[in-house]
Image (cartoon, rainbow, N blue to C red):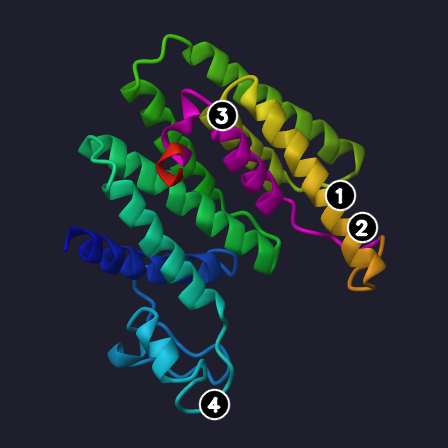
Amino acid sequence: MDRIVAFLFGTIVGSFLSVLSDRLPRHEQVVWGRSYCDHCKKLLRWYELVPIASYLVQGGRCRRCKGKLSFQYPVVECMTGIGFVLITQKFLPPLVSLCVMVLFCSLLVITVSDMKYKIIPDSMVVSGIVAAGFLLLINNSSTYALYFVSALGAAAFFLILWMATRGCGMGLGDVKLAFLLGLWLGFPYIVIALYLAFLTGATTGVILILAQKKTLKSRIPFGPFMILGAATAAIWSTQAGILWRIFL
């Protein structure tokens, strides 16, 4: 029963995360603005907003204009539901669980926003930094300085890349995300995360170019690769692994 409640609550949160990932990059009202169809702009009714179920019942299309709805919505809702189930089943202290959920949700919104709009929302980076900072405090880490220096080092590295490429290779959003991931992972795991990010990003870029989906001048969002690399590196981390050990 607890798992069902956690999943349902997670899907509701996931529905809101999808709204955030779309509205934050477009600078739209988040809290008070009602949901609408991206095609016909008609406001959606409450029964059209039921997580996962409404998408399946409507066949993935708007009831009015029959425009195709993004598969992003059920995927994010399902991922958040599963994530909340796994987090709550670990019976962590309430404050730890809350911080883990905030960090998880922040990284999920960043991933979707960057993939879809090539924008990393500042508010999500800030919420992630706050959650990662609280996790350090809760775990009574005696190496706060090392994590902070790791965050500064990662951000400085990406800032140099941003300046060297004049904003064409990297964006300032990547610089801020690097700080968040450095604060969460610490040294040496942030180094592993960035290595994996560049490896997977370069491999994906080559594949897309060979498949003629992208060109050498195309911009590929790098945030998702950074988060994927961080997730992989955190599995072997002792301090930061509090989030990803939940998924093992």
Callout 3–callout 1 Cβ contact below 8 Å: no
Q: Amino acid at mark 2?
A: Val
Please say whether residue 209 is one of the residues in the magenta stretch: no
Label 1 or label 4, whichever lies nearer to me, is 1
Separation (CA) of disc 2 from disc 1? 6 Å
Callout 4–callout 2 Cβ contact below 8 Å: no
For disc 3, the marked residue is 236
Q: Residue at x 38, y 77 (%)?
A: 55
Q: Is residue 140 visible?
A: yes
For disc 2, the marked residue is 206
User: Which quadrant would residue 58 be assigned to in this image?
Assistant: bottom left
For disc 1, the marked residue is 202
Callout 2–callout 1 Cβ contact below 8 Å: yes
Q: Amino acid at mark 1?
A: Ala
Indicate which disc, 2 or 3, sits on the residue closer to the N terminus: 2
Separation (CA) of disc 4 from disc 2? 36 Å
For disc 4, the marked residue is 66
Indicate which disc, 4 or 3, sits on the residue closer to the N terminus: 4
Quick one: label 2, few (<14), some, or many (20+) residues within 10 Å? some
Label 3 or label 1, whichever lies nearer to me, is 3
Indicate which disc, 1 or 4, sits on the residue closer to the N terminus: 4
Separation (CA) of disc 1 from disc 4? 38 Å
User: Would residue 86 be found to the left or right of residue 73 on screen?
Assistant: left
User: Would residue 176 be found to the left or right of residue 136 on screen?
Assistant: right
